[in-house]
Amino acid sequence: MDVVTIGESMAVFSPESSPLMRYAATYSRKFGGAESNVAIGLTRLGHDVGWISKVGNDELGKGLLSFIRGEGVDVSQVKIEHSAPTGLYFKEVRSASNVRVEYYRKGSAASKLTIEDLNEAYIAKAKYIHVTGITPALSESCYETIIHMIKVARENEVKVIFDPNLRKKLWSEERAREVLLEIAAQSDIVMPGVSEGEFMFGETDPEKLGELFLNHGASLVVIKVGAKGAYYFTKEESKLVPGFPVEQVVDPVGAGDGFAAGVISGLLDQLPLTRAVERGNAVGAMATQIPGDFEGLPTREEIEQFMNSSDSEDINR
């Protein structure tokens, strides 16, 4: 197993008849969730990925599970929760820079995750585990589950990748900052955005943030800086890796998950850090071109074509 991730996926409803939910009479239904987005992104790039979660014993849960299984993700560790429903969220894309999300996930099946839902032997077989700051926000038992999963990984020399993925709607800022800093201190690789770094450390300069995260415990820090690309930092080196310009952003949701999948894919392929982060930038850029949380995530052939064509454009300019 290359990567094991854990977290909630939900049914996603988006207005079709009007951009505004208050006027919409018809909606499209898709699925989405940060961790399963990363899992799907990695499987499309040819990697072996497992996803741990819970879904409700309902039609949406069954559809979600079937869909993610169909994308090639191992769902053997996903359990059916009979006492709670599959979570929902509504996504309103008013414009590429104005996306509003409303969650209906309190008391959801995934919020019932506990330490007992973890198979330690399954985690120990992975090269990396991937966790976000979303899952511990869902409930106290989810927080305990994430902390225990990290403990199991470290005991078995499995590297921990952490994307803070701050969701202020899910918990208090004080608790969020406390937990995000706690998890970052126990992670090998941390992938924040500048705004998340500011939330955690009160600093906006990427180079200072890189140093703060390294001193906090990470061995590799990758900081997203939007269209400019991303910085990476280790104790030995640091660099800004430029992003890939796109003519128009169609849907920004899921771009960060695509970025994470691209970087992790590069690390699994043992690429130099510059190339791994470049792959992350490319996947993130491609993810913005198609509506949906994961629909734009590319296959290996598609990402190579995109990166090669971008290289050719750079040469011709």
Image (spheres, rainbow, N blue to C red):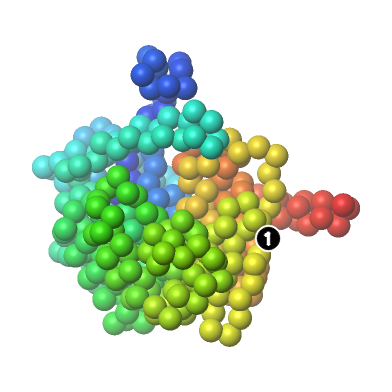
Residue 119 position in % (x across, y down): 23, 67
At a point 33% along the width and 45% down the height, the residue shown is 9
Q: Which residue is at 64% across, 56% downward? A: 228
Q: Three-letter amino acid code at disc 1?
A: Pro
In the picture as drawn, the residue positioned furthest to the left comes out as 83
Q: Is residue 234 visible?
A: yes
Residue furthest to the right: 316
Please identify the residue farthest to the bottom as the structure is shown. Answer: 236
Image height of 125 relative to 255, above or below: below
One can see residue 50 in this view: no
Quadrant in which the N terminus is drawn: bottom left
Neighbour class for label 1 at 10 Å: few (<14), some, many (≥20)?
A: some
Q: Is residue 209 left or right of residue 123?
A: right
The one of 288 and 49 positioned closer to us in this rendering? 288
On the image, numbered disc 1 is attached to which residue? 242
| Left or right relative to 150: residue 201 | right
Q: Could you tell whether 251 is left or right of 128 in the image?
A: right
Position above or below: 17 against 264: above
Residue 173: x and y in percent read 28, 55
